[in-house]
């Protein structure tokens, strides 16, 4: 399933579908079709109406753990890992729906609200960046320079809201259960003098510091690697289950946000990321490369 728009949430009457809800619904639909069962039969198993099954499969409503367990038994799903991943996805979706995140109180973050909310419940992110330092790695100076260059943000207060939002998001890199992030960054993003040599030098030094965190892996894809498979643009692969069975892909375009929720399509991006990672420098050599550029720009 591929969706696009400025938000990953859709409203349908008094129902709201979320990226995670649609992902879960699509998985339940796939299992029902594979088991050659009808929505009416599934509804009977749940002692519910067929309308409820429709809402579940379209991601319009949160799904309870007992309903998932009952449907998996009915569909003869014997893979414990698959059942576990569906339960984890459902819990993440319920958490996503009930919590009004801090990002919703900041108008300047409206275009990013759905992504930030997904990032907040994700366990792992694989990120490919071509032209910018990943948001979770940006220094305040770098973010300000980026906003000014964007021309979309001319109000100083709004720019500072974005800077503050970045700082809050970066808290996920620390704590008892930090976000696991693996980023592959094209050399161009490291050499682009966003804000000038001094700002960029400090940004690169910050990258070197982050690379020392056990939950952060940074690789550089150097120019000398030549042609690479990710020329189509940056993307994020977000995982919400321990076994990495549930991935969705996020991409920003100049006019919209695209979410790819279909398992087959998201697997393509996982493969693209693996190829970019394989063509990149090792984390150790990447750290040395970044450190060298940082010193060069600070001179």
Image (tube, rainbow, N blue to C red):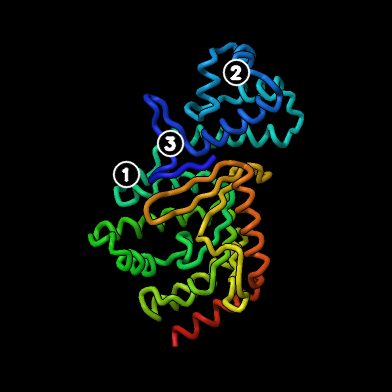
Q: Earlier in the sequence, mark 3 or mark 2?
A: 2
Whether 133 is drawn above or below 123: the answer is below
- Left or right of 76 on screen, residue 198: left
Tag 2's secondary structure? helix
Residue picked out by circle 3: 99
Q: State the residue at coordinates (36%, 74%).
A: 195
Judged from this view, the residue extending furthest toward the bottom is: 299
Q: Quadrant of the N terminus?
A: top right
Judged from this view, the residue extending furthest toward the right is: 78
Q: Nearer the viewer, mark 1 or mark 2?
A: 2
Q: State the residue at coordinates (68%, 44%).
A: 243
- Mark 1 packing: few (<14 Cα in 10 Å), some, or many (20+)? few
Q: Quadrant of residue 201?
A: bottom left
Tag 1's secondary structure? helix
Q: State the residue at coordinates (50%, 61%).
A: 233
- Left or right of 240 on screen, residue 132: left
Marking on residue 236:
none
Q: Quadrant of residue 65?
A: top right
- Mark 3 packing: few (<14 Cα in 10 Å), some, or many (20+)? few
Tag 3's secondary structure? loop
The CA span between labels 3 and 2 is: 30 Å
Whether 243 is drawn above or below 161: the answer is above
Marking on residue 39:
2
The CA span between labels 1 and 3 is: 12 Å
**Residue 263: x %, y % from top left:** 62, 42
Q: State the residue at coordinates (37%, 79%).
A: 196
- Mark 2 packing: few (<14 Cα in 10 Å), some, or many (20+)? some
**Residue 102: x %, y % from top left:** 37, 45
Residue 165 visible: yes
Residue picked out by circle 1: 105
């Amino acid at each position: 399933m591929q969706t696009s728009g400025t938000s990953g949430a859709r409203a349908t009457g008094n129902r709201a579908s979320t990226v995670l809800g649609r992902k879960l619904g699509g998985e339940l639909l796939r299992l029902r079709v594979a088991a050659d069962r009808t929505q009416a039969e599934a509804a009977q198993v749940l002692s519910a109406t067929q309308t409820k099954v429709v809402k579940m499969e379209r991601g319009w409503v949160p799904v309870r753990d007992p309903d998932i367990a009952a449907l998996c038994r009915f569909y003869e799903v014997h893979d414990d890992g698959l059942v576990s991943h569906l339960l984890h996805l459902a819990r993440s979706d319920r958490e996503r729906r009930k919590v009004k995140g801090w990002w919703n109180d900041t108008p300047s973050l409206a275009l990013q609200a759905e992504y930030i909310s997904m990032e907040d419940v994700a366990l792992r992110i694989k990120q490919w960046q071509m032209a910018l330092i990943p948001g979770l790695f940006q220094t305040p100076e770098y973010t300000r320079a980026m906003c000014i260059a964007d021309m979309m943000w001319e109000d100083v207060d709004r720019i500072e809201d974005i800077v503050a939002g970045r700082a809050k998001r970066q808290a996920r890199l620390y704590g008892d259960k930090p976000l696991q992030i693996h980023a592959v960054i094209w050399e161009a993003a490291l050499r682009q003098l966003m804000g000038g040599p001094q700002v960029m030098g400090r940004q690169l030094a910050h990258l070197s510091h982050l690379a020392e965190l056990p939950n952060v892996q940074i690789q550089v894809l150097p120019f000398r690697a030549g042609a690479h498979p990710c020329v189509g643009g940056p993307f994020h692969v977000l995982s919400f289950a321990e076994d990495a069975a549930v991935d969705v892909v996020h991409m920003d375009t100049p006019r919209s946000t695209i979410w790819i929720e279909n398992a087959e399509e998201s697997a393509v991006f996982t493969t693209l990321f693996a190829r970019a990672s394989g063509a990149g420098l090792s984390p150790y050599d990447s750290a040395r490369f970044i450190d060298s550029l940082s010193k060069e720009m600070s001179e």
